Image (cartoon, grey):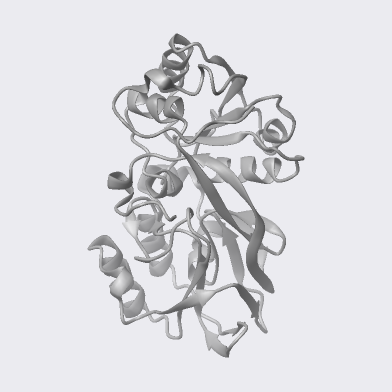
Amino acid sequence: MRIGRAAGGSDPSSDVCSGQFSGRIVVVANPGAGKHDRNTINLIAERMRRHECHVEVVESHGAGHIGEIARTADAAAILIAGGDGSINEAVGGLLKRSRPLPVLGVIPQGTANVLGHDLGLPRRPSDLADVFLRGRIHPLHIGLANGNPFILMASAGFDAEVVGRVDKRLKKLVGRLAYAAIKVASGYKNYDMEVTTRDSKFLAKLVIVTNSRFYGGKFVMDNETSVLAPGMKLIFARDLSILTLITLAAELLMGKLGDSSLVERMPARGVQLRSQREIATQIDGDQLGTTPLEVSECPETIEVFVGSDKQRGFALPA
């Protein structure tokens, strides 16, 4: 019971629910996600049902429930309507299953929806339903931070401190970049971290290990990285003055962070972070804990529905 890699096109007549694919499709709605829209979920479900898909919509109830649904649901595909944190939880549940795994689908409804941009997903319900109907899938590459799976990034320092200290209601109202500026104004103190890779050791004040091209939504952080290709990128700053932070934020907003001279970057298969003081860490926009932090590539991948190359800005890896 697998989804075929159907070619793209405007007509989903040869969809995943006829012939080559059959089985239950579970749509998980997360009412706690930012920008939750049940009407969008219903429109997607109804469009797929018109193509003879067996679609069931279920609602999550509290922390951990999405992961439990992903781990136990009898389904050929699981579509998660929520933000990046909801997807992260679902991935954790899927990785606990025996293979073959259900195919993962993303209905972007969170605050930033970084993964949706990396997958090239449209926002209109009818177009998004057609992505699932055509059944174009690709391996989703995953990272591990202290053994916890992440899809987008793991970080330590300022970025993680923001995630841990700012109220989630504020995040929904003003967005991640804006509340980062709020933390700058509050006088965040920087401390050195010892960064160890397979080839080098150095000190840094901000460390991000990214699996994604994007940050905070559609803002490009690295021009080469993608969740659809193997390999992570280590991005770090040795200095993190207020002026540096303001300049980095401006470069991000202008789409120039990928070429910034204020940060250094290198390919990374494994990264270890140590510090004399405890420094905040985060994965996929949710607080993880504090240093030490060990980041590595997950040996497993998960099949995920993908949209157009045009919307991603580059072609799918071979």
Q: For this view, does 133 lie left or right of residue 248?
A: right
218 shown above or below 98: below
Q: Position of residue 277 (x, y in %)?
A: 66, 80
Q: Residue at x 45, y 58 (%)?
A: 212
* Residue 8 figure quarter: top left
Q: Nearer the viewer, residue 119 or 156?
A: 119
* 198 left or right of 42 in image: right
Q: Residue at x 42, y 49 (%)?
A: 114
- Residue at the farthest front position: 19
* Residue 80 % position (x, y): 54, 33
Residue 116: quarter of image: top left
The residue positioned farthest toward the left in the image shown: 254
Please report the residue visible at 33 percent of the width from the left and 51 percent of the height from the top: 218
Residue in the foreground of this view, choosing between 89 and 51: 51
**Which residue occupies 60% across, 30% down?**
2
- Position of residue 279 relative to residue 275, above or below, is above
Residue 15 lies, with reference to residue 226, above or below; the image says: above
| Quadrant for the C terminus in the image | bottom left
When asked about the image quadrant of residue 287, the answer is bottom right
Measured as percent of width and height from the top left, residue 123 is found at: 34, 33
